[in-house]
Amino acid sequence: MKIHKAGRTKRLALGSTVALTVAGMNAPAVLGFASEQYHHYVINRPEYKAQYGHWQTLSLPAEFRVNAVHATLLRTGKVLIVAGSGNDEKQFNAGTFKSLLWDPAENTYKLVPTPADMFCGGHTSLPDGRVLVAGGTQRYEKLAGAVKKAAGVMRVRNESPEHDRTFPKGTVFVSPDGHEYASTAAVTVPAATKTGSGKQTVVTAGEQHVYVEAVGPGPDYASDSPAQYRIRGLSGADAHNLYGQNEKLTLDKQEYQGIRSAFEFNPDTELYEPVTDMAHARWYPTLTGLGDGRVVTVSGLDDTGEILNGNDNEIYDPKTKSWSKGPDHYFPTYPAIFLTASGRLFYSGSNGGYGPGDKGREPGLWDLSNGAFQPVPGLRDPGLTETSSSVLLPPAQAQRVMVLGGGGVGESPLSTARTDIADLSSAKPVFTPGPDLPAGGTRYLNSVILPDDTVFTTGGSSGYRGRGDSDLLKAQVYHPDSNSFSTAAEPTVGRNYHSEALLLPDGRVAVLGSNPLFADKAETQPGGFEQRIEIYTPPYLYHGDRPQVGAVPRTARLGGSVTVGTARPEAVATAKLIRPSSVTHVTDVEQRSVALDVTGRTADGVSLALPGNADLLPPGWYMLFLTDSAGTPSVARWIQVTG
């Protein structure tokens, strides 16, 4: 595996032509000074950076450019960027799947062998720092006009109680009139079950579904009548006991299809390691870590392109590396589901867009112990939650979740500037209005918790996937204490669909990806995938010296305390543990900032107390930040929280 180390990137604003007037900035009155040069001058002045922050753009070496669809910060400080096939069907057909490890501190890059198409899967960090990746792409969508071969779902039945049967991809099912259809994936059909005895014996056939496609093109293969299909190659008792049943095979649009595969990414070996497959294939699922270290997995399109119906949620146990059935509840794809201090999960209403507009869209608290769902009312513009952003506001102890922006169902041109906040500490929580987004209606907004207890939001577009040149080159900071936004420096790269942003250990923010539908306002040219990375340096890193962190224990226990070395303990105003981001499709349910009490100071350190609630502070690796009274953070140190 090849490793590349690039030279340090200068912090320059590249290619911006936006005119900017800043009150109080005394630019030289030079006749004919070009607007771009003037803008460049203004945004690089120390006074400007100290108020608005600063952007730099990284253009990776060609061999390391990937379509960043997923990004997770590892406990090593490196960022795992997953493209899979990268929304490129040619790469999918070629079996070319990519992941990139980027080290922001050293500016190095390394391609990682990627064993399956993880494009549009789900992921989360586990207590030991590994990353669980589950689901991805089995098949790309085909629009109705592009479908040449009839296809549909075949239910494969096994009436023999003797054993399961596995059929490989390409198994042929033959209709009563002799038409043949091949399976697009392998399928294992469970054995039949027997109950009772003697004349009272009842045999119930085992069943599993698989997607099939006609071996030839044309409407002759289409069928809308239920029928039984024999499996080519079987004879005798097998031919009697094993067969397919189908309701219809059509030339209609074919949706994306998911996979059952799951892997753990090991940050030490920097390799994916296979674990037990899920019971259900998933494309666009959400994975949320629980207080006991397990992971709940919900929603997604299955291996036939149908959205999972809610009785197929699963829970992963990293101790056994296996899955079990979870409680029932239906969600649209990529739902934003947060672990709350009560142990219940809060669904904010934000989602990734597949599923009917009148089902599963209501926010609420979900109790995994009994499946109960308590609606949380009051969210404004409830029909505009697709592609919205949601964030557990800092500190996590406040138990407030904010929903920002969003758009209409599907390819709707509608978007909203709405922000609303749910206070989950109440027995009967409701949403209350927050300030409108300064840029107006916004979809695909990325929101990142900063160590000064603010939330940085950036990018997005007012239209669906940036249509009509609608990318918003704006950024702002939300202040929970005053319930207001302040202006941040403007990014220079548009970000919409398939974009993500995350906090780095040095306090900066990395912004990646973007997958516009078109490259021009007239919508005559298809859009390309944005492969540049932008890094935003917040104003707090231009306010002078930052706190220094010395000796830090490697682990800390819930409800315990730790002593952290620092040269100026009297300057430490706050301390917090920030869980690393694992983000895709502007959905990041893992990031959270948990405040620590400063319980003592010595000549060379501070004592910090951890909460004892694992549902507030789930087990795993965290970035420990110390901040001074101005909000300037230290460089983070990694610490593992255990039960």
Image: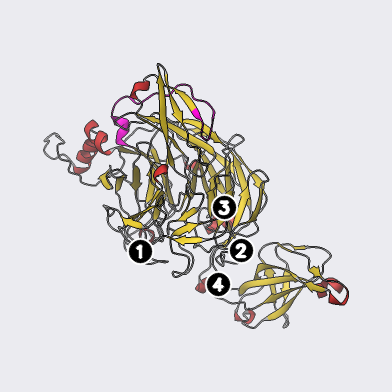
Residue pushed farthest front?
427
Q: Which of the two discs, 2 and 3, labels the residue nearer the N terminus?
A: 3
> Of 270 and 614, which appears nearest the observer?
614
- Magenta: predominant secondary structure element? loop
**Is residue 108 something one can see in this rendering?**
no
Magenta run includes residue 10? no
* Residue type highlighted by circle 1: Glu
Q: Mark 4–mark 2 contact, CB under 8 Å?
A: no
Q: Which residue position is annotated with label 1?
A: 523
Q: Secondary structure at mark 3?
A: strand
Q: Secondary structure at mark 1?
A: loop
Label 4 – label 3 distance at C-alpha: 35 Å
Label 2 – label 3 distance at C-alpha: 20 Å
* Residue type highlighted by circle 4: Val
Q: Which residue position is annotated with label 2?
A: 303
Q: Which residue position is annotated with label 3?
A: 296
Q: Which residue position is annotated with label 4?
A: 147
| Residue 16 in picture, x, y percent from top left | 28, 44
| Residue 71 in picture, x, y percent from top left | 49, 45
The residue range painted magenta reads 538-561
Q: Nearer the viewer, mark 4 or mark 3?
A: 3
* Residue type highlighted by circle 2: Asp
- Say left or right for 634 vs 53: right
Q: Secondary structure at mark 4?
A: loop
Residue at 54 percent across and 60 percent down: it is 299
Eyeballing the image, is 557 above or below 198?
above
* Residue type highlighted by circle 3: Val
Image quadrant where residue 569 sits: top left
Q: Nearer the viewer, mark 2 or mark 3?
A: 3
Q: Which of the two discs, 4 and 2, labels the residue nearer the N terminus?
A: 4
Q: Which of the two discs, 4 and 1, labels the residue nearer the N terminus?
A: 4
